[in-house]
Amino acid sequence: MEITEFLEFSIGQSRSHHSVHYLAFAHLEQVLSNTDIESQSVDESTVVVEIYLDKSR
């Protein structure tokens, strides 16, 4: 599979949730993330990356 084919399959939105447990400190950290991959024309040479982290939980 070539990278262009991989990216075509990746178009859309996905959500991710992960947590880290620090047992020694009795601390829990949770992170939610949303990923949006949009199609752009082949002529464009710009890559746009937007990252939003929600640590409110």
Image (tube, rainbow, N blue to C red):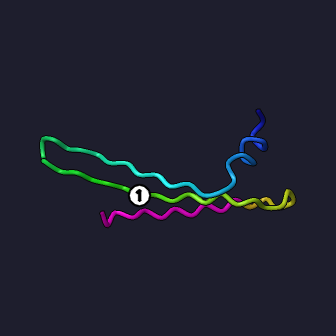
User: Residue 24: percent from the left, percent from the top?
Assistant: 12, 41
User: Residue 39: percent from the left, percent from the top?
Assistant: 75, 59
The vertical placement of 33 against 3, above or below, is below
Relative side of 45 to 24, left or right: right
Q: Which amino acid type corresponds to the residue marked 1 in the rendered image?
A: Leu
User: Residue 42: percent from the left, percent from the top?
Assistant: 85, 56
Question: Dot 1 corresponds to which residue?
Answer: 32
Q: Give the residue displayed 78% in from the left and 36% down from the top.
A: 2
User: Residue 41: percent from the left, percent from the top?
Assistant: 83, 61
Q: Give the residue displayed 16% in from the left and 41% down from the top.
A: 23
Instruction: From the image, give the main secondary structure of the stretch colored magenta.
Output: loop
Magenta-colored stretch includes residue 37: no
Quadrant location of the C terminus?
A: bottom left
Relative side of 18 to 8, left or right: left
Relative side of 53 to 43, left or right: left
Residue 47 lies in quadrant: bottom right
| Boundaries of the magenta span | 47-57
Residue 3 lies in quadrant: top right
Quadrant location of the N terminus?
A: top right
Residue at the top extreme, as displayed: 1
Q: Give the residue displayed 46% in from the left and 58% down from the top.
A: 33
Quick one: SS at disc 1?
strand
Magenta-colored stretch includes residue 48: yes
Q: Give the residue displayed 79% in from the left and 59% down from the top.
A: 45
The vertical placement of 25 against 47, above or below, is above
The vertical placement of 21 against 11, above or below, is above
